[in-house]
Amino acid sequence: VTGFGLNNYEWRITATKPNLTSGKTYKIRVRAVDDSSPTVNAQAVISSTTFSFETSEATIAVTAPANNSFVSAVTAISGTAADQFGVRVASIAIAESPGAYWTGSTFTSAGPVWFTAQEPLTTSNGVDFTWSFSSNTFNFQDNRQYQIRSRVESNAKITKEGNPIVFTFDTTEPDSNIDAPTRLSYPANANAL
């Protein structure tokens, strides 16, 4: 206990601290007692605080666009994130594959530029979250492949990057031709076509 004058003190535990388990919630209770005589005075209402201890990482995944998909329009990128004690923020970075990262308007950055998904994240239970990021300036080019990286930060401020996904932006109409029968042929067996 260290005194600061005017009967104000600060205390610390410097002895061996208990081993805390990740994923558990703990409560610390403190009761002050002075050294007055002949009878000590004790704090009537015990002070307490509750905290959660976590060393595990949250999880994050991009769900749209789907990995290895071909898409003709992207107005939003969305996904899921989860953490036992809650998710603070989800972010994405988009790159041409291979190539430069999106800056918010063009693909010109050598390194990732992280964009925060909408806040607050959507949750029904405080553990599982959905997130989304929308933009009208993605500027995806036809027949190009893109990579989306995602990362999450838990309420314990532990950051984790998820698995990247890749998709191909495709706005070109398909083309088809009939090779047989030709316009001038007379097939002997039309059922064999």
Image (cartoon, rainbow, N blue to C red):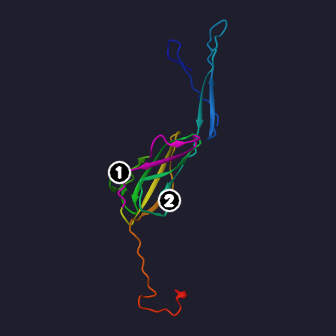
Q: Is residue 99 left or right of residue 2?
A: left
Q: Which residue is mark 2?
A: 66
Q: Position of residue 48 (x, y in %)?
A: 61, 24
- SS category of the residue bearing label 1: loop
Amino acid found under the numbered disc labelled 2: Ala
Q: Is residue 18 left or right of residue 139?
A: right
Amino acid found under the numbered disc labelled 1: Gly
> Residue at image x 45%, y 44%?
118
166 is higher (above) or lower (below) than 136: below
Quarter assignment of residue 144? bottom left
Quarter assignment of residue 138? bottom left
Q: Position of residue 44 (x, y in %)?
A: 64, 14
> Residue at image x 50%, y 61%?
67
Q: Is residue 34 left or right of residue 144?
A: right
> Residue at image x 44%, y 56%?
148
Q: Nearer the viewer, residue 6 or 21?
A: 21
The quadrant of the picture occupied by the N terminus is: top right
Magenta stretch, main secondary structure, is loop
